[in-house]
Image: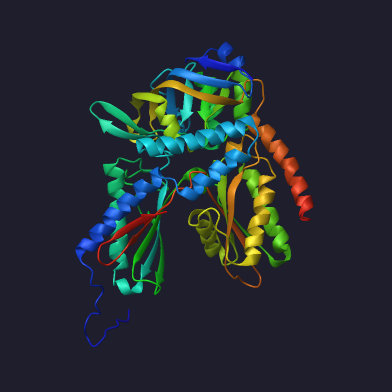
């Protein structure tokens, strides 16, 4: 393997102290627990708006119970949903911070394990064949890390999402072809929503990935489902119009809250897209259940932490 | 639509009177189980160490805190029932379970078992574990701790409901009815969007 050196000296990897990575660890722990307990304001508003819209007795009862669960979690500082999920970290690192991504990952793994042990939380992670649960919420390649590097700022931004399985099990990828067109894409989305029915805890956020390669398409669907606040629109006007069109169409199906009937099956439709191959027309679906949990933090080099959603 | 207050163990008559759309509130004891518990019972053939005759079973794996001599609740909620579909005939036919509390509903094989043995499915709101945990007074028993958190649990519940009878012992399912209407609606939507 070739070795690269710069005049024989090792390139400086970062100037931050161990204290900074301890802060990252604490923040990782705090983010996991916060995400499980404090539902973002946009999701609360969307649920309240759904309750105001619904006229069916069952749909109103179901939405009322959801809002009551959020209120109890606030009041008693408890978890909203028991599914502690698979921990996902979306990390955006400013190049000027001089932080070491390897140390950041290690600190967030320790934070996740500490949240699980110290709160305590249910570990929802296991090995795929022997199904052994290490009771730490971590494991081989878990948590899932999504990295982004930027020159826009000199901070460390962390978005933490505990991804529940009720919705994650409802993930689909279809490698459509150009001849299927946008009509094929719409059909696939609507037929999938019918198929998954009551399973992913409706009313949910429907994340759609369009274009890219198979793996990128699914990643785009994940970004659409879990990182965007409800009410946000894809900045591309054509994509934004498609989001609106699918939202209306899906809610006409009448699946409703918890699949017991009603006019609110989804709280939002989010589409994220990428260009694709001239022979490809991929579409992916990833769902985020109604407790669409996420917590965000921004850390600066001088050790300040700001929490958000 | 009628409202009932029931205390397990339930008799066949308790369950046969229930119709989809009715509301049920439970008092007393219920059992918690799910994927790994049921795989152990039915795929590995290990009989449950407790009597489940007339029992009400909740699809769950809780968050707990270990305390002297047992477990304390942290957060208890309900998981997606459709994964447990193929175990319903065994639970009801072999072990006498009368009701399953779950979310998302179950399919034809479960509905048929409910019709045949006198069982029902009680829908709870998924994701609303904070609400559900309030109604579970205490964890009274745990078996098969090697499956943590998917052990066999025994909970004492207070004012546990209202739960919606979503599948009854007469072959009716709210999920099937909603799905059938949704299928018709889909045909109309595909037509309107000119993509049928």
| A97 sits to left or right of B2 | left
Q: Percent position (x, y) of residue A302?
A: 25, 66
Tell me, yes or no, if residue B101 can be seen here: yes
Q: Is residue A239 above or below residue B83?
A: below
| B92 sits to left or right of A243 | left
Tell me, yes or no, if residue A130 can be seen here: no
Q: Residue at x 72, y 41 (%)?
A: B183
Q: Is residue B28 above or below residue B71?
A: above
Quadrant the N terminus of chain B occupies = top right
How many tags in the picture? 0
In the image shown, does A76 or A170 lie closer to the viewer?
Answer: A76
On the image, which quarter does residue A239 sit in?
bottom right
Q: Is residue A1 above or below residue A235?
A: below
Q: Percent position (x, y) of residue A216?
A: 53, 64
Q: Residue at x 64, y 67 (%)?
A: A280
Q: Is residue B8 above or below residue A188?
A: above
Q: Residue at x 61, y 60 (%)?
A: A283
Q: How did the renderer colour the structure?
A: rainbow
Q: Percent position (x, y) of residue B97?
A: 51, 20
On the image, which quarter does residue B106 sit in?
top right
| A73 sits to left or right of B111 | left
Q: Percent position (x, y) of residue A81?
A: 44, 39
């Amino acid at each position: 393997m070739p070795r690269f050196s710069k005049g024989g000296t090792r390139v400086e990897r970062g100037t931050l102290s161990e204290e900074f990575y301890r802060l990252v660890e604490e923040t990782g722990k705090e983010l996991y627990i916060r995400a499980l307990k404090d539902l973002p304001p946009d999701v609360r508003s969307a649920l309240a708006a759904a309750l105001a819209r619904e006229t069916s007795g069952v749909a109103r009862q179901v939405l009322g119970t959801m809002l009551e669960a959020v209120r109890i979690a606030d009041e008693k500082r408890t978890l909203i949903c028991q599914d502690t999920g698979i921990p996902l970290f979306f990390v955006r690192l400013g190049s000027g911070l001089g932080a070491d991504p390897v140390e950041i990952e290690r600190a967030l793994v320790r934070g996740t394990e500490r949240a699980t042990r110290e709160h305590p939380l249910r570990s929802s992670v296991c090995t795929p064949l022997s199904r052994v649960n290490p009771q730490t919420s971590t494991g081989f390649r878990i948590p899932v890390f999504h990295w982004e590097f930027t020159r826009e700022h000199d901070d460390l931004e962390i978005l933490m999402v505990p991804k529940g399985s009720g919705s994650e099990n409802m993930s689909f990828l279809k490698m459509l072809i150009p001849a299927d067109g946008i009509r094929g894409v719409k059909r696939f989305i609507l037929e999938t929503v019918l198929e998954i029915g009551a399973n992913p805890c409706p009313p949910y956020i429907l994340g759609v990935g369009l274009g890219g390669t198979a793996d990128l398409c699914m990643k785009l669907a994940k970004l659409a489902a879990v990182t965007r606040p409800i009410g946000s629109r894809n900045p591309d006007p054509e994509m934004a119009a498609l989001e609106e069109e699918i939202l209306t169409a899906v809610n006409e199906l009448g699946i409703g809250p918890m699949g017991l009937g009603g006019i609110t099956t989804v709280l939002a439709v989010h589409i994220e897209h990428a260009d694709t191959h001239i022979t490809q027309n991929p579409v992916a679906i990833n769902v985020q259940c109604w407790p669409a949990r996420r917590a965000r933090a921004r850390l600066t080099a001088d050790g300040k932490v700001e929490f958000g959603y | 639509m009628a409202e009932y207050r029931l205390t397990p163990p339930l008799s066949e008559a308790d369950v046969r009177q229930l119709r989809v759309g009715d509301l049920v509130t439970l008092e007393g004891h219920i059992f918690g189980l799910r994927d790994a518990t049921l795989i152990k019972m039915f795929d590995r053939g290990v009989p449950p160490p407790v009597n489940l005759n007339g029992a009400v079973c909740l699809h769950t794996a809780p968050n707990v805190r270990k305390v002297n001599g047992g477990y304390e609740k942290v957060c208890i909620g309900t998981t997606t029932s459709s994964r447990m579909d193929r175990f319903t005939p065994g639970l009801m036919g072999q072990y006498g379970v009368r009701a399953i509390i779950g979310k998302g509903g179950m399919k034809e094989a479960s509905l048929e078992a409910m019709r045949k043995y006198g069982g029902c499915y009680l829908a709870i709101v998924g994701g609303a574990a904070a609400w559900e945990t309030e109604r579970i007074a205490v964890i009274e028993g745990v078996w098969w701790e090697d499956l943590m958190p998917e052990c066999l649990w025994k909970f004492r519940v207070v004012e546990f409901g209202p739960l919606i009878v979503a599948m009854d012992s007469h072959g009716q399912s709210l999920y099937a009815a909603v799905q059938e209407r949704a299928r018709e609606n889909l045909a109309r939507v595909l037509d309107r969007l000119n993509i049928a």
